[in-house]
Amino acid sequence: MSLADRLREALELGRTRSPELLAGDLLEDDGPASVPAAVLVAVVDRAVPTVILTERPHTMRKHPGQISFPGGRIEPEDRGPIEAALREAEEEIGLAPAVVDVIGEADPYRTITGFQVIPIVGVVPADLPLRPDPREVAGMFEAPLDFLLDPARQTVRTVDFQGQRRSYYEIMWDGRRIWGATAAMIVNLSRRLELVS
């Protein structure tokens, strides 16, 4: 069975279960989300599957320097979250939509900046000649899918925030800190998929 078929089957099976999911990062506002957005969880078809992640430039107004999936707001011309995620991935990292085998939508997640983000899971071939746009992407790397989905790697951190103790998820991989909304979306996906091997 191909990686795409295994992921598709796992996501469909995951939809029949009712795991406890994160609706919004515990650091974030309880206010309503107003901006629809989508990100691409691009799983690279390797012997050990990986996920493409980007680092946002420190000059960006929102979430500077954070690790994230390629993605952004759903524009009026987009025909939905899948098209938006594919368009954004092409703009940010040069990933052609035609090479993405779209698996489906994962659970939406609300961010502190007012975005309701729908993760789109897709499988892409290995070793594509990707070209990150330096205006939107300071760096790009791949992290092992099984590592990211492993609950033992998903650490809960607690901080003082606006006078209260708050918690959030963090995943450390190869010296990189994946946290906030990106980590929360990974946690949700892991709860839907369990471990895909």
Image (cartoon, rainbow, N blue to C red):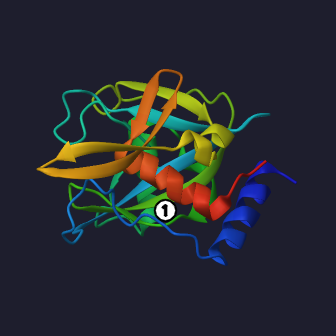
> Is residue 17 rendered to the left or right of residue 167?
right
Q: Residue at x 52, y 39 (%)?
A: 95
Give x and y (percent) for residue 197: 79, 47
- 17 or 157: nearer the eye? 157
> Is residue 42 rendered to the left or right of residue 172?
right
Give x and y (percent) for residue 120: 52, 58
Question: Which residue, as the protein is rendered here, is positioned at the far top?
Answer: 175
- State the image quarter where residue 58 is shown: top left
Residue 25 in view of the camera: yes
Question: Which residue, as the protein is rendered here, is positioned at the far right?
Answer: 1
> What secondary structure is found at the residue carrying circle 1?
helix
Q: Give above or below for 193 relative to 138.
A: below
The residue wearing badge 1 is 82
- 150 or 125: nearer the eye? 150
Q: Residue at x 72, y 63 (%)?
A: 10
Q: Residue at x 45, y 26 (%)?
A: 176
